[in-house]
Image (cartoon, rainbow, N blue to C red):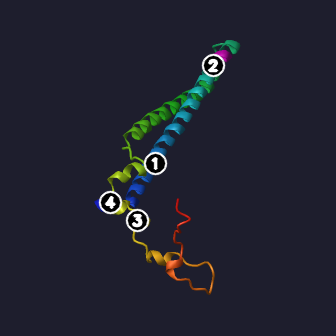
Amino acid sequence: MSEAATNSKDGITRKRKNYLAKRVGALSIVAVSGLISSIGFAAATLIAIWVVVSAFNFGWYSVALLIVAIVPAIICLAIAIAAWMGCWRARIIAASIPYVPPEREQVKVLPAVEILVRGSEQPPTAPDELLRAAQDGKSIPADELMRPTESALP
């Protein structure tokens, strides 16, 4: 991308939109990974508590109960750890995205030609042609249009 295109208004807008899209994407991954991690840790904890309570009720000799309950707990724990690692990586990626300030702060960098507004150009008509009579068909001389009078001045 050329420097002129990067410094133009469109280039600044495009850079800001790309920054916001990357930032929102990275932070969305952080949020979803954190949510999955929390649910996984909660499920593993609840399954472990259920195993302990069931073991006291049915006795520790119930190997089938332990296998049936511990396998889902291990799976939930593995999912939670993987999601937490994804959350951690996404946070690092989100922090490494370089900040692009809003457009109003970047306008200071633009050359004066690109900052000027349309109203600063010369009008297409002469000043005496801008005011016209509101009545159709009557032609009023330009020197009689909207001139201050002595009584109107303070």
Kindly indicate whether the residue at mark 1 contacts the one at mark 3 (C-beta within 8 angstroms). Answer: no
What residue occupies the far right of the structure in this picture? 57
- Give the number of the mark in front: 4 or 3: 3
Q: Which amino acid does the dot numbered 2 rest on?
A: Ile
Q: Earlier in the sequence, mark 4 or mark 3?
A: 4
> What mark, if any, has residue 20 been given in the picture?
1
**In the image, what residue occupies the spot 31% across and 59% down?**
111
**Alpha-carbon span between mark 2 and mark 4:** 69 Å
- The residue tagged 2 is 49
Q: Residues within 10 Å of mark 2 (few under 14, many from 20)?
A: few
Q: Indicate whether 20 appears above or below 128.
A: above
- The residue tagged 4 is 112
Magenta span of residues? 50-54
Q: Which amino acid does the dot numbered 1 rest on?
A: Leu
Q: Quadrant of the N terminus?
A: bottom left
On whether residue 15 falls in the magenta region, the answer is no
- The residue tagged 3 is 120
